[in-house]
């Protein structure tokens, strides 16, 4: 998955083109930033995705400008970034971030087959919250008709990861300055039931499974 | 800050061009996704930023390809997105996300004045962790020389926010399906001191202030 465009130029030891590493990072998230060129200018927009094999699926309303721009098969660049810890050095210069980031290149195409469209929506749903799809009312024909699904094939991609401690200049270790990592945690908090929930409805299993789980 | 390019086309009620709303979202984060056009193709890369007034500052190594591409004053698009809750409806179709997102357009220019460069680095540091800058060894001349700082002026921008409960179709409220919000929390966890920390160094005040605080 390595080409000149996706080559990690800075600090090459942090870069990897390994598919499993790239997929591993993609599979931990469900929001990506998509960049495309619109009248010679870049536009970056966030969207929800679901990965299956070497493809990402996106969905949206038929009238979405973003999807309309993308379905014509224009070049896209996609970034997914997780920030895991602040790296607090003794010197301002050596402050850093522990993170995992993926940048992808490729094109998207409209999914027209209804079976694949349904399956793509399931994949996106599973990416956001595993097992939710099986609990809910599935899209009907009318809903499917107003929904657009795009399939993005990963043509090139790279991952960049920093997962290290503090590195200061030798002489700075003598300074009386606290240094260390400040980890960042993301988790689901206590679910808030819809006020219009029918009496006696138990919390969904999909929700129970992840409440208070780290994301 | 509203032009055709930044106009929120979908669900206009979620869009705003109000500067204070845009700044408010920017000020809660420190990572953005920057998109630029490189040889007719989009490239999206994450970076740390600091906001001052109507500008964002970025920094990196002199040799950074991203900064080299950007300093020539090319068009940039920047997105910052916070995901606050999964919105779990009774129907797959009405699942949604509560989020805050900002998309900006503008250009970046190299900061050449050393005083502004120093101040920009302080602003970036403050954005990531308030008060850390005053605790650490400041950049020396050599470090400043190998660091590049860019200033991005926000020419256009819009914010998009969803902060609502579940909205299902009337007849779906009768279904025996749990619905509600699943809030997402991001916070700093327990700091991990550098194993090479000198004996007797107390935890930094900047770190103490935010440990276990929501981000």
Image: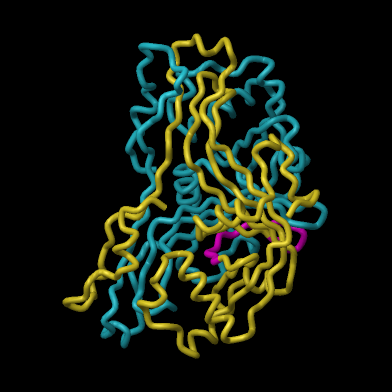
Chain colours: A cyan, B yellow
Q: Is-magenta flag for residue B47? A: yes
From the top left corner, tell me how far across and down residue B206 is, in percent: 34, 67
Please determine whether, in this image, residue B213 is positioned above or below residue A137: below
Q: Is-magenta flag for residue A26? A: no
Tell which of A184 and B159 is nearer to you. B159
Q: Provide the residue span drawn in magenta.
A: B36-50
Tell which of B193 and A52 is nearer to you. B193
| Quadrant of residue A204 within the rendered picture | top left
Which secondary structure is most common in the magenta stretch?
A: strand
Q: Residue at x 34, y 71 (%)?
A: A166
Please indicate, yes or no, whether residue A71 appears anywhere in the rendered image: no
| Quadrant of residue A51 within the rendered picture | top right
Please determine whether, in this image, residue A69 is positioned above or below residue B11: below
Please determine whether, in this image, residue B62 is positioned above or below residue B34: below
From the top left corner, tell me how far across and down residue A206 is, in percent: 39, 26
| Side of B72 where A93 appears, left or right | left
From the top left corner, tell me how far across and down residue B208 is, in percent: 29, 63
Tell which of A124 and B47 is nearer to you. B47
Q: Residue at x 45, y 60 (%)?
A: A161
Q: Residue at x 48, y 41 (%)?
A: B84
| Side of A145 where A188 appears, left or right | left
Q: Residue at x 25, y 69 (%)?
A: B203
Task: Look at the image and tell me in which quarter the N terminus of chain B lies.
Answer: bottom right
Please indicate, yes or no, whether residue B128 appears anywhere in the rendered image: yes
| Side of B68 where A54 appears, left or right | left
From the top left corner, tell me how far across and down residue A82 is, in percent: 46, 53
């Amino acid at each position: 998955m390595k080409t000149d465009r996706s080559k990690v130029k800075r600090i090459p030891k942090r870069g990897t083109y390994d598919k499993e590493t790239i997929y591993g990072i993609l599979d931990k998230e469900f929001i990506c930033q998509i960049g495309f060129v619109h009248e010679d200018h870049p536009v970056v927009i966030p969207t929800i995705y679901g990965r299956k094999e070497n493809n990402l699926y996106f969905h949206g309303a038929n009238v979405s400008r973003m999807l309309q721009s993308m379905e014509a098969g224009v070049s896209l660049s996609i970034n997914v970034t997780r920030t895991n810890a602040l790296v607090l050095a003794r010197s301002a210069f050596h402050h850093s971030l522990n993170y995992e980031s993926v940048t992808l290149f490729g094109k998207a195409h409209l999914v027209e087959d209804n079976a694949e469209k349904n399956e793509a929506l399931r994949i996106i749903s599973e990416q956001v919250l595993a097992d939710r799809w099986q609990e809910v009312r599935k899209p009907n024909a009318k809903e499917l008709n107003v929904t657009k699904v795009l399939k993005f094939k990963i043509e090139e991609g790279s991952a960049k990861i920093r997962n290290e401690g503090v590195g200061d200049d030798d002489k700075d270790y003598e300074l009386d300055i606290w240094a260390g990592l400040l980890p960042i945690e993301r988790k689901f908090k206590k679910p808030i039931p819809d006020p219009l929930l029918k009496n006696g409805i138990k919390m969904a299993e999909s929700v129970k499974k992840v409440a208070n789980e780290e994301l």
